[in-house]
Amino acid sequence: MADGYNSPMPYKRAAKIYDEAMLYEYAVGALSRKMRTVAELKRLMREKVRQQGEEGQLLVKVVIAKLKKQRVTPGFAARTRSSGACAWCRT
């Protein structure tokens, strides 16, 4: 007997479509949870936008460029006002 808790989902959840703002929030959240290299962050974001094809890959590049422009890089913690907001900022 299948109950509501143990039965398989009757439908597949639709893939989430990410825009630049959503992907940026995801990146900052990922960085706030754990210090990551640029390559690790790119890998995580590429997994999120895999279904979006070339547009998703472009979004990854844009978000990484935005983070770099804001100087969200290792060693920046001593000089930034938001050092607690991002793991890249922790030294």
Image: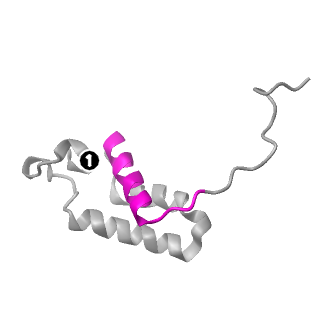
In this view, 60 is above or below 10: below
Residue 64 visible (yes or no): yes
Q: Nearer the viewer, residue 17 or 49?
A: 17
Q: Amino acid at mark 1?
A: Cys
Residue 58 as seen in the image, left or right of residue 36? right
> Tag 1: Cα neighbours inside 10 Å, few (<14), some, or many (≥20)?
many
- Residue annotated with mark 1: 86
Residue 91 visible (yes or no): no
Residue 61 percent coordinates (x, y): 39, 71
Q: Residue at x 58, y 64 (%)?
A: 50
Quadrant where the N terminus lies? Answer: top right
In this view, 48 is above or below 62: above
In this view, 8 is above or below 50: above
Quadrant where the C terminus lies? Answer: top left
Residues rendered magenta in the picture: 16-33
- 56 inside magenta stretch: no
Q: Residue at x 39, y 47 (%)?
A: 30
